[in-house]
Amino acid sequence: PPPPPESVWPTLSQGERGRALIARALMAEPALLLLDEPATGLDLAARERLLSAVDNARRAHPELASILVTHHLEEIPTTTTHALLIRDGIITAAGTVENTLTTEHISHAFDHPITITRHSGGRWNATATGAAR
């Protein structure tokens, strides 16, 4: 027989724990999945596995609404359709992901010149492009 869950949890990596928590949340068939900085502390491979799990969950459950909070554009799943930018508690931009995650909007939100690019696979990249304002 498998070991009891409480004895397995301490042996899981942070990435495995994140994926397990998403799976656990999906078991309840929620209307909304809220992910607050889910990739914090993960190495590159674990982050990519977690983001793939989020994308797969969204594809498998199209009726599921989700909100992902992050400061890192590289952590935005490819299935993301809308974005909201907040600076000092004030919404600075909102709308479709393509119209919101722009060089102009991101530079304003972070008060720093940042160039935004989107790769053919749908993932985003942010690169600082100059001195602080």
Image: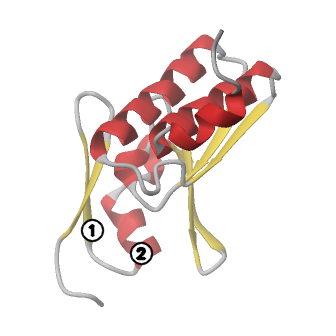
Residue type, label 1: Ile
Q: Secondary structure at mark 2?
A: helix
Tell me where residue 81 appears, x and y as whole percent. 53, 34
In this view, the residue in front, 84 or 22, is: 22
Residue on which the image places disc 1? 114
Look at the image and tell me whether residue 81 can be seen: no
Identity of the residue furthest to the bottom in this view: 133
Tell me where residue 85 appears, x and y as whole percent. 54, 62
Q: Quadrant of residue 24?
A: top right
Q: Is residue 47 above or below residue 78?
A: below
Q: Residue at x 30, y 90 (%)?
A: 133
Q: Residue at x 61, y 37 (%)?
A: 9
Q: Secondary structure at mark 1?
A: strand
Residue on which the image places disc 2? 110
Q: Quadrant of residue 76?
A: top left
Compared across the picture, whether 91 is left or right of 131 comes to right
Q: Quadrant of residue 104?
A: bottom left
Q: Is residue 4 above or below residue 9?
A: above
Residue type, label 2: Phe
In this view, the residue in front, 119 or 103, is: 119
What colouring method underlies this structural image? secondary structure
Q: Are marks 2 and 1 in contact (CB under 8 Å)?
A: yes
Look at the image and tell me whether residue 111 can be seen: yes
Numbered disc total: 2
Which mark identifies residue 46?
none
Q: Quadrant where the N terminus lies? A: top right
